[in-house]
Amino acid sequence: MSVDATPSRTMALAEQLIALSSITPDDKGCQRRLIELLAPLGFACETIASNGVTNLWARKGTRPPLFVFAGHTDVVPTGPVGQWQSPPFVPTRRDGKLYGRGAADMKTSIAAMLVACEEFIAAYPAHQGSIAFLLTSDEEGPAKDGTVVVCAMLEQRGETIDYCLVGEPTSVHSLGDTIKNGRRGSLSGHLVVNGIQGHIAYPQLARNPIHQAAPALAELVAEQWDSGTDYYLPTSWQMSNIHAGTGANNVIPGALAIDFNFRFSNASTAESLQARVHAILDRHELDYDLAWTLSGLPFLTPRGALSSAVSAAILAETGIRTELSTTGGTSDGRFIARICPQVIEFGPPNASIHKIDEHIEVRFIDPLKNIYRRTLENLLA
């Protein structure tokens, strides 16, 4: 890695974590390194393993309120390594940026959280409440053995979380311009419209599922599912894949397969959306099979103590008045929100996440740490 300047404590830890090739669901020792740093601070650290996934629950203190830093140590695959300007798991500083897989999503956030805790605990050894870390190596994957498992364990124990700050990369143009106070739900469908295969020259002897489905699909595309809310954009329905046919140009296909997805606000429910889709398909008298997958319910944290604490910390550190947003994909916040009334996501700019040459601007690294520390001060000092 580049050694053109002495790295800050936060940058050095971020580089250590980036160097561990923790492609989901393999933690590659990231959480072990974090335990080495958390235990001396007084955190009781538990490793919860589930089907090859490594999870960490680390808590300091027993008094309320409980403030939790949450995130993931796993990263997405690198893509073609040869297209990277520098190896993805060799953290490299150049042109004012720190490059490496996980630099923005979200190993720098985790490093900033830990160093923020070190500084906060040193300054306020008798601080109010308790602090915890909830980390998983299964956020970028199926998310079935990660945060959801830890949350279920905490619920069984009767442990309650008052505030949770998730380190997802939420900023758009500059650090702190956007935080997430919720996410839309995600509901997917796999639709198969059944027809009768036949020779294309004898359509009267076949039934073309493409022709039959087209009016229904047009209606689904044009449908207004809801008008959104003060915090959410209107629910959207999008087709992602469509396939029919054998590859021959003289065969009417026997079936049409379509994958689609709802990103839905809390103005709708999964059940109401499913019912409306079935009603449209039935009205067009289609012979179909439809399998549903609900991967996340919408969650929302209205303006309150946590959003105010994070917003004030951002303003004090950067001078930016942040915006609340619920856009973007799903996150593990959807699981935490089941046991925590206030969940906010905040992290570095997200323009390079999941891309070749993922990076974070070096000038944002220590301010990110400072914002996390200031948030702790605003709530627990």
Image (cartoon, grey):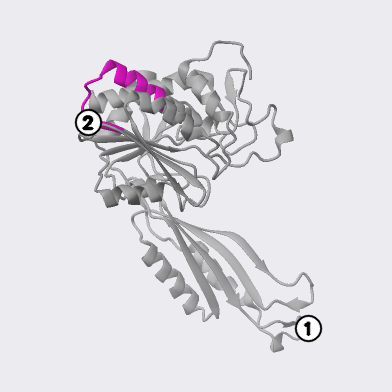
Q: Position of residue 215 (x, y in %)?
A: 56, 72
Image side of residue 54 versus residue 21, left or right:
left
The magenta-colored residue range is 114-131
Residue at numbered disc 2: 129
Image side of residue 375 versus residue 108, left or right:
left
Q: Residue at x 49, y 28 (%)?
A: 108
Residue furthest to the top in view is 5
Q: Residue at x 33, y 49 (%)?
A: 153
* Comes first in the chain, label 1 or label 2: 2
| Viewer-proximal residue among 318 and 223 | 318
Residue at numbered disc 1: 201
In the rendered image, the quadrant that contains the C terminus is: top left
Q: Position of residue 325 (x, y in %)?
A: 39, 40
Q: Comparing marks 1 and 2, which lies closer to the viewer? A: 2
Q: In the image, what residue type sits under mark 2? A: Gly
Q: Residue at x 41, y 65 (%)?
A: 273
220 is higher (above) or lower (below) than 365 = below
